[in-house]
Image (cartoon, rainbow, N blue to C red):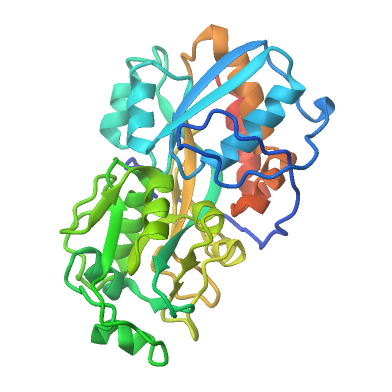
Amino acid sequence: MKLQRNGRSKALAIGAMALVGSLSLAACGSDDNADPKASGSAAPSAAAIACGKAGQLLGAGSTAQQSAVDVWKVAYGNACAGSTITYSGGGSGAGVQQFNQGKVAFAGSDSALKPAEVDASKEVCKTGQGINLPLVAGLIAIVYNVDGVDNLVLDGPTLAGIFDSKIVKWNDPAIVKLNPTAKLPDAEIQAVHRSDDSGTTDNFTKYLEKTSAGAWPYKAAKTWAGKGGQSAAQNAGVSAQVKQVKNSISYAELAYAQTNNLKSAAIATGASKPVEATAANAATTFAKAKIAGTGSDLALSLDYGTKDEGAYPLVLVTYEIVCDKGNKAETLDTLKSFLTYAISDGGQQAISTKGYVPLPKELSDKVKTAVTALA
């Protein structure tokens, strides 16, 4: 993910982090129909969160981060009496649109703002502009529903063919070559893509653009461009479709694959063996992330074409889109308080059991600095 503006790139020295910690997770007002990782455990003490002014804070956008925000908003609401965090999904495109219309204090987006979106944000951020603050790191699982096939392996060219209706049978030679011992059926592939503008789609198509050796002829974008296939809205929608439809395949944030008990394909990247869709393997890819934004903008550039051992290439970072300056006075204090908790060690550890990858300290420290400076 790279914001289109000039600026030096800085390598992030990221080490693999232990995925620990848990937090109370209640199904609390998700517009993605249900919290994909609802479970119960003790909420943090009030002392762990520095509360802002009492009131309501509105956010919208990415469904890939929905379960992370559900964790955070329950914890924040429990700790901060009179404060309510309301986050509606709808996809990254819808979130950015609502932010630039002044309807929400922050937007979740799996893709950094484009130059035109930054320009549009200046109408809302009267004395500043929208910036990208990475808050949630995760991965996109290639989910599938094929009886008798438990360890599917796919690669960039093959996925490009499947999702552009050029590979239409599960026993196509390209799939057989990657899975010589699998009992692949002579059945039509039911490929499912996002119907809404989606940062998950943007990241998935960036991977296809980078790794398909020209088999994916379209530019990476939030809007789906491939031919054929079925469509469904949001991560919850495509996951439900795959669960219900035999011989189907789609792409979804890992939490939704886990919740729906869907099988996830390993990716052949050119490393010595295919890489499985796990948070630990995604962390290996994040180890070489670079900051591409300038100033307080922390947009990242990720290597979707990595061939490093154990590095899962289909990763994403969800940004919270906020005004660097010109935030509404009545919500600024709560916005800063909530984001400070979310980027804290406790906030990041709380979502690690939901399939997310805690951000490395070097990057989280930069986000904390940027949040403190919001005005």
Q: Is residue 354 visible?
A: yes
Write the residue at 28% across / 75% down: 158
Of residues 202 and 242, the one drawn nearer to the viewer in this rendering = 242
Does 294 sit above or below residue 310?
above
Front residue of 238/204: it is 238
Q: Quadrant of the C terminus?
A: top right
Q: Residue at x 34, y 61 (%)?
A: 245
At which x and y percent is residue 268?
A: 41, 78
Q: Residue at x 25, y 87 (%)?
A: 173
* Image-based side of 168 in relation to 93, left or right: left
- Quadrant location of residue 119? top left
Where 340 sits versus 366, above or below?
above
Between 89 and 272, the one lying in front of the other is 89
User: Image check: 58 left or right of 172?
Assistant: right
Asked whether, in this view, residue 281 is left or right of residue 17, the answer is: left
Labels in figure, total = 0
Q: Position of residue 34 (x, y in %)?
A: 52, 39
